[in-house]
Amino acid sequence: MVTIALTELEPVSTVIEINESGLKETDPEIVNKMIGTSFPPLFT
């Protein structure tokens, strides 16, 4: 699952924070799992 949060700091500045759960960065198969995900991504 991917969560995207937009936080407006000023009228001309926004922070975009992207969090992904379900994958471990120490997993040796992480790239294959990321490539194997369905496209296009679904945003909720």
Image (cartoon, rainbow, N blue to C red):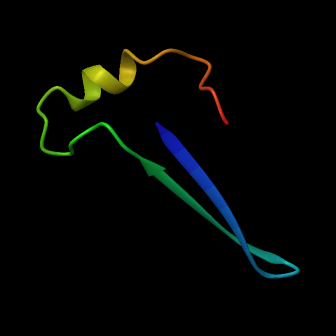
Q: Residue 43 placed where, x, y %?
A: 66, 34
Q: Is residue 10 left or right of residue 20?
A: right
**Residue 44 versus residue 9 in the image, above or below:** above
Residue at coordinates 27% horizontally, 38% vertically from top-left? 23
Q: How many marks?
A: 0
**Residue 38 versus residue 7 in the image, above or below:** above
Q: Is residue 19 left or right of residue 34?
A: right
Give the residue furthest to the front: 44
Residue at coordinates 56% horizontally, 16% vertically from top-left? 39
Give the residue furthest to the bottom: 10
Can you say which quadrant of the picture contains the C terminus? top right
**Residue 15 versus residue 26 in the image, above or below:** below
Q: Is residue 32 left or right of residue 36?
A: left
Residue at coordinates 46% horizontally, 52% vertically from top-left? 19
Give the residue furthest to the right: 11
Q: Is residue 39 left or right of residue 34?
A: right
Q: Residue 36 placed where, x, y %?
A: 37, 15
| Quarter of image, res 40 | top right
Q: Name the foreground residue: 22 vs 13.
A: 22
Q: Residue 20 placed where, x, y %?
A: 42, 45
Q: Name the foreground residue: 6 vs 12.
A: 6
Residue at coordinates 21% horizontally, 45% vertically from top-left? 25
**Residue 31 versus residue 10 in the image, above or below:** above
Q: Name the foreground residue: 8 vs 22.
A: 22
Q: Residue 1 placed where, x, y %?
A: 46, 36
| Quarter of image, res 14 | bottom right
| Quarter of image, res 41 | top right
